């Protein structure tokens, strides 16, 4: 008979997206997690996770089991929330942090509707992607694109998007379009610099269909940490730029957009919802639920 504890562990591993970070959160070893997941697979007679040297992803049946378990958990959450709502209306001020590029089209346009639904909640939004200490800075909720160094915060993987290469039609006519990742060395391409000014030596391009990875030197003539400014760089007609696939490019007027190496993505960004460990008021609960539901809907649009 399978263990309900192991089923719970499986859902946490899929939510967080990492054995190591799940181990830190639950204060158990990652080898214990691996063993318990393997035991669960043997007891169920199915493979739940597809694991490679770098990461893992749920199998089709693993994803179905996870979504069914989460549906049941959400049903319980809804019942509890409904009972709580009868006792108290969400109210107060929330201090939140969002990454500017990711939130531009996926979160920000829907904030007013949330505020209309909860008229007694006020929002202070800071758009950045820096390392954040929720306790020290008095932040209730944040979304960031890296695992936080402060592991005493409540952490959950909430969203993933890809960075793809594009140029304008003018660029393609003047300079041509690379046919293979190695040819990017002959073009002016935006590289990536992190918020702490560190620059990786290499850039990995992953074939979306085959998972083949091609590693090239990181373009360094111009590096950027902001996908919105990459759009403006690309508009010049002189640069190939990496753009996030969740940004609605119809806002911009640069003529026909030309995908560069469309079968590859240059980066997959994983976003994490982090919550202050001591802040669990109703206002926080309903806001986090709003974020999860909104980003789940956005993910369905993209995929």
Image: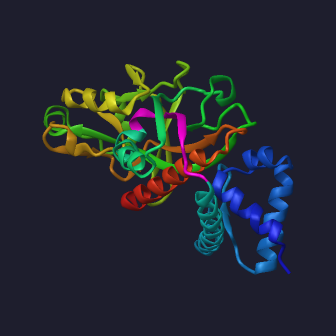
227 sits left or right of 65 in the view: left
Quadrant where the image shows the N terminus: bottom right
Q: Residue at x 83, y 64 (%)?
A: 36
**Residue 24 picture location, percent across and down:** 79, 43
Total label count?
0
Say which of 162 and 53 sits in front.
Answer: 162
Q: Is residue 88 visible?
A: yes
Q: Residue at x 61, y 74 (%)?
A: 68
Where, by quadrant of the figure, is residue 107 drawn?
Answer: top left
Q: Residue at x 48, y 28 (%)?
A: 128
The colour scheme of the drawn protein is rainbow
209 sits left or right of 184 in the view: right
Judge whether 185 appears above or below 251 on screen.
Answer: above
Q: Residue at x 53, y 35 (%)?
A: 93
Where, by quadrant of the figure, is residue 253 drawn?
Answer: top left
Q: Is residue 212 visible?
A: no
Magenta-drawn stretch contains 118: no
Say which of 228 and 84 sits in front.
Answer: 84
**Residue 23 picture location, percent across and down:** 79, 48
**Residue 20 picture location, percent across and down:** 75, 46
Say which of 85 and 10 sits in front.
Answer: 85
Magenta-drawn stretch contains 97: yes
Where, by quadrant of the figure, is residue 5 drawn?
Answer: bottom right
Which residues fall within the magenta stretch? 88-101
Say which of 36 and 65 sits in front.
Answer: 65
**Residue 303 picture location, percent across and down:** 40, 61
């Amino acid at each position: 008979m399978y263990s309900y504890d192991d089923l719970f562990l499986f859902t946490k591993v899929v939510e967080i997206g990492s054995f190591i970070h799940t181990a830190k959160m639950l204060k158990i070893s990652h080898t214990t997690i691996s063993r318990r997941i393997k035991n669960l697979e043997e007891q169920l007679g199915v493979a739940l996770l597809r694991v490679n040297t770098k990461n893992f992803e749920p199998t089709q049946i693993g994803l179905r089991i996870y979504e069914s378990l989460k549906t049941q958990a959400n049903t319980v959450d809804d019942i509890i929330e409904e009972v709580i709502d009868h006792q108290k209306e969400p109210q107060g001020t929330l201090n939140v942090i969002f990454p500017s590029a990711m939130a531009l089209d996926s979160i920000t346009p829907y904030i007013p509707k949330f505020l209309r639904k909860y008229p007694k909640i006020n929002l202070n939004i800071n758009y950045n992607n820096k390392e954040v200490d929720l306790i020290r800075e008095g932040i209730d909720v944040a979304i960031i694109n890296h695992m936080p160094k402060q592991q005493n915060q409540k952490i959950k993987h909430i969203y993933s998007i890809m960075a793809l290469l594009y140029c304008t039609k003018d660029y393609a006519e003047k300079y041509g379009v690379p046919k293979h990742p190695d040819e990017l060395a002959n073009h002016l391409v935006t590289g990536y610099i992190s918020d702490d000014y560190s620059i990786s030596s290499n850039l990995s391009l992953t074939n979306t269909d085959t998972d083949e990875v091609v590693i090239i030197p990181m373009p360094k003539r111009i590096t950027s940490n902001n996908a919105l400014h990459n759009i403006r760089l690309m508009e010049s007609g002189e640069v190939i730029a990496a753009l996030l696939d969740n940004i609605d490019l119809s806002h911009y007027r640069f003529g026909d957009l030309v995908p560069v190496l469309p079968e590859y993505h240059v980066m997959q960004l994983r976003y994490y919802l982090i919550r202050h460990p001591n802040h669990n008021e109703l206002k926080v609960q309903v806001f986090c639920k709003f974020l999860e539901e909104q980003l789940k809907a956005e993910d369905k649009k993209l995929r």
